Image (cartoon, coloured by chain):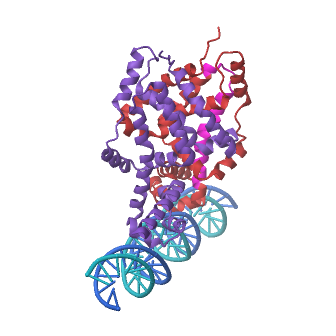
Chain colours: A purple, B red, C blue, D cyan
Amino acid sequence: MSVEKETEEKIFEAARTVFQKSGFEGARMQEIADTANINKSMLHYYYRNKDNLFFEVFKAGVKKIVPQLLAILDKDIDLKTKIGEIVEFYYLTFKEDPQLPAFIIYEMNQNTTRFKSFVKDHGIVLPQSYIDQVNTAIQAKLIKNIPPKQLLMNIVSLCLMPIVAKNMVQMLFQFDDDNFQNFLNERRQIIPEFILAGIEYKEVK
Amino acid sequence: MSVEKETEEKIFEAARTVFQKSGFEGARMQEIADTANINKSMLHYYYRNKDNLFFEVFKAGVKKIVPQLLAILDKDIDLKTKIGEIVEFYYLTFKEDPQLPAFIIYEMNQNTTRFKSFVKDHGIVLPQSYIDQVNTAIQAKLIKNIPPKQLLMNIVSLCLMPIVAKNMVQMLFQFDDDNFQNFLNERRQIIPEFILAGIEYKEVK
DNA sequence: TTGATTGTCAACCATATGGTTAAACTATTT
DNA sequence: AAATAGTTTAACCATATGGTTGACAATCAA
């Protein structure tokens, strides 16, 4: 049994690597097997077929991002802290898994169905508490008027876009990998400042 | 000769459609031929092979985005106007070609080389005039201190991310296509306001 | 120890896919 | 009108790819 888990785990890790690098269509079962150092038949023995294996990887990827974000959004903390936590969460998560967001976003565009079932199974919904929090802040004139979804879109855009468009950014800004990492690191401070100013956030004493 | 251009054009358009929908790996030469309503051999007759055809489509895509952005950045207009123009440019361009940015960004991550040659051939460089403009504005205390590349990254992120992550956004926000289009439209106003507030922009009289 | 269950592998299979070819057809030139 | 060059097509080819099979090994239950 320990052997079984080991192999299954090896396969999954290899699949994660290859699928995230090449996408569903670009990934080859043989390459996954080679990466895992096992026979190709094992892939089918444990996961039946390519779709299945892919979906496992895809699900794990979504699980790593979405529920965490929603949990932070739902927290009972003030808006400023919340924004800071989101920025930090994205920075840390994608520092160690930089290809994940591009992978998820691309594959979701290719096949919405895959994701839909996941959303239903996990009851993924934007927390009402977040919506209320923003609207309350607006009414209290603590921030300027902005639809909560638009604000969230802004936050996520600022965090994810540079990572998703990594090569484009590196090319246009003529960054090597170090420069790019510094650029991202710099954004940990710049993004929260930019957002808070953007909504004209007023501190509550 | 008119027939030739017609066929070549038909092939290119079909290739654009299919490649943008499915990506390089997911695209099938047969599907392109079917979409163009011609025999598959014609693809090879006019474009030799898949790589070639793809690269033409890819180049055209980049040409539609990058030079335009750089041209606006290089314009001798004040920062506020410039930001407004970028936001409008992106909105209008991708309203009629929504899959383009995700396509370019994804394929660029898959194969940097493809893009590198393009950048070299077209002398694509971030205009110094833009860098200077931002730095000057900072020194004049017209905006708060922010590295020009970070500011540009913010602008582009806010414009592109929702389009690139369309399905993700629609799912999470429970938008149908109309809702989504309205959401994007709403951003034409929200993004410039958000950015100008974000950099604490002061009007020059 | 032995019989059964589970895991692993090399060889194999069917099909899809990018690409080729040679012949037919069409327009253009002489 | 004949020859030439350019365009289009159906049939074909080699290979890559996802998936299967059957033999064999390891592990476990009795």
Q: Residue at horizontal 44%, vertical 72%?
A: A41
Q: Is residue A152 above or below residue A199?
A: below
Q: Return the x and y of residue A111 as percentages of the image width and height.
A: 40, 50
Look at the image and tell me in which quarter the C terminus of chain B lies.
top right
- Residue B27 is left or right of residue D23, and the answer is right
Asked if residue B72 lies in the magenta stretch, the reply is yes
- Residue B197 is left or right of residue A105, and the answer is right
Q: Residue at horizontal 69%, vertical 20%?
A: B138
Q: Return the x and y of residue B90 as percentages of the image width and height.
A: 54, 32
Residue found at the far top of this picture: B205
Secondary structure mostly seen in the magenta stretch? helix
Q: Nearer the viewer, residue B124 or A1?
A: A1
Q: Residue at horizontal 44%, vertical 21%?
A: A146
Q: Is residue B4 above or below residue A80?
A: below
Asked if residue A176 lies in the magenta stretch, the reply is no
Q: Return the x and y of residue B203 as percentages of the image width and height.
A: 62, 12
Residue B93 visible? The answer is no
Q: Is residue A67 above or below residue A59?
A: above
Q: Residue at horizontal 42%, vertical 60%?
A: A53
Q: Nearer the viewer, residue A11 or D12?
A: A11
- Residue D7 is left or right of residue D29, and the answer is right
Q: Is residue A35 above or below residue A188?
A: below
Q: What count of labels does the image hold?
A: 0
Q: Nearer the viewer, residue B33 or A22?
A: A22
- Answer with the quarter of the image where residue B155 lies: top right
Q: Return the x and y of residue A45 as percentages of the image width and height.
A: 39, 70
- Answer with the quarter of the image where residue B60 lies: top right
Residue B18 visible? The answer is yes
| Residue range highlighted in magenta | B53-81
